[in-house]
Image (spheres, helix red, strand yellow):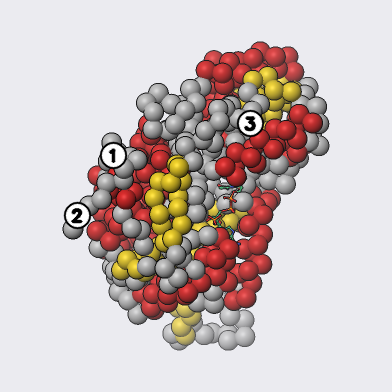
Amino acid sequence: MATAISPRYPETAVSDFLARKHRLLINGRWVESSSGKTFATLDPATGEVLSHVADGNKEDIDRAVAAARNAFDKGPWRRMAPSERGKLMWKLADLIDAHTEELAQLESLDNGKPLAVARAADVPLAADNLRYFAGWATKIEGNTISLSVPYTPGARYHAYTLREPIGVVGQIIPWNFPLLMAAWKLGPALAAGCTIVLKPAEQTPLSALFLAELIQEAGFPDGVVNVVTGFGETAGAPLVAHNDVDKIAFTGSTEVGKLIVQAAAGNLKKVTLELGGKSPNVILKDADLETAIPGAASAIFFNHGQCCCAGSRLYVEQSIFDKVVDGVAQQASKIKVGPGFDPGTQMGPLVSEEQLSRVCGYMESGFNEGAKAVVGGKRKGEKGYFVEPTVLVDTNEKMKVVQEEIFGPVVTAIPFKSEEDLIPKANDTVYGLAAGIWTRDINHAHSLAAEMRAGTVWINCYNIFDAALPFGGYKQSGWGREMGHDALELYTEKKAVCARIG
Ligand code: NAP
Ligand code: MG
């Protein structure tokens, strides 16, 4: 078969892939969407069309769920030796490594992030996550329990628990780390022996489709992983509502998270949610500013601020406030903003026009309420969805820019006088995903960490992720945890077995 080359991206390693007709992966086969419709995914650096993907709808979700249900109930996956599941996952991780360049290019083109970042972070972290969970496949254990049932005196029992896969899971992921979010979701589900219907974000479906090709190449049984591209309302919602789905795992906005909880109520499927944040990053006056200042800049500007855990509220002890704000502003002004594909780019465009207007709208609302930009404060250029790295001051706790998730490269810097002043402010949002603390006094850091209502606290570092470290939110930042043993447990049910033996 002659392969087409995408005319707009002839120089890339993925031009064939971009030009290809993308379909849905259902039951181990690539199929058209039942409507025959497709939609375009755009290059956020230019707003131009990158590729077309299938527009999956309820009928496609029904087909994918039926395939996952059949693969779970009747297929070999659940009964396969755990070491065999682990080997397949490890093989998939090796294939990801072997295709680092293609995956990194797709991620950069589709999401806008710098190619170097996708190569160094997104792709290797995705492979690492699958390997970590491949190791868990052989370590899923229950326990034995001694009983003393009061109404059967003298009777003896042998009682134990089993950890079993939860069943068919629907996984709905966002666009900020498209491949990595797929890996975070797939890893624990596959290790536990679940079967999956994955719906990538409409803005960034390409790396999930490439990953699906690798899943096929690795040799997973048919129906274990199904991938349906499409929109939230027409593909995501029917997946959440489906009666044959046992669990939904969702990452995205708190707003949609709440819709998911309601839509899942029909069959009371289990739900885990990884939602938004408005994380406080605290610099104390005894901090090493050589690391704290660049640390605070990277806490907000990494991935263009499109991180659920972004350090978007920077609390600085009064006596060093001006120095830190100057330092972070200098860092911001040095960031090279440009297309993710350009060598040297440190910050790419936001993912979509919608995000561009959302982020600019937040900045406008801040200015209208009296906030000032020390650096940045507006869109950059006319083409593509670029925003200037921005540091806001003169804010107060009531402003939208301090309370709501902006999801862009915008930090509000706020001085504090004492810890009594700081702690209530730091915890004063509906979110509780992460927090940062910068100080040389490590005892102090740990006592402050205990005061933070957040699922992750970073001390003298920020945005440190590891497959073994649980990640998730307090309050409206979510339910459950991603990664680590916690994530695995959330893809299992616990069964108690009780036998009378005397
Ligand atoms: P979103 O709507 O929450 O999207 C996340 C995922 O949910 C996407 O796959 C989306 O599909 C799907 N979805 C949307 N509505 C759904 C529904 N009713 N039922 C089932 N699935 C549904 O997020 P967004 O609109 O892209 O971004 C808006 C804001 O969300 C951002 O500005 C940011 O504040 C936050 N956000 C947070 C994270 C995070 O990591 N916690 C990630 C991304 C965004 P579509 O592709 O059709 O939207
Ligand atoms: Mg795109």
Instruction: Give neighbour class at mark 3: few <14, some 14-19, many 20+ (Cα, 10 Å).
Output: many
The nearer-to-camera label among 3 and 2 is 2
Residue visible at 64% across and 14% down in the picture: 326
The answer to whether the residue bearing label 3 lies less than 8 angstroms from the nearest atom of ligand 1 is: no
Where does the C terminus fall, quadrant-wise?
A: bottom left
Q: Which label belongs to residue 410? A: 3
User: Could you say where residue 270 lies in the image, as x and y percent from the top left?
Assistant: 56, 67
Q: As drawn, is 322 to the left or to the right of 122?
A: right
Residue visible at 69% across and 23% down in the picture: 373
Residue visible at 74% across and 23% down in the picture: 372
Q: Do the CB atoms of the residues marked 3 and 1 lie less than 8 Å apart?
A: no
User: Could you say where residue 463 lies in the image, as x and y percent from the top left?
Assistant: 52, 35
Q: Is residue 472 visible?
A: yes
Q: Amino acid at mark 3?
A: Val
Q: Amino acid at mark 1?
A: Pro
The nearer-to-camera label among 3 and 1 is 1
Q: Which residue is mark 2?
A: 2
Residue 323, placed above or below residue 489: above
User: Could you say where residue 336 lies in the image, as x and y percent from the top left?
Assistant: 48, 22
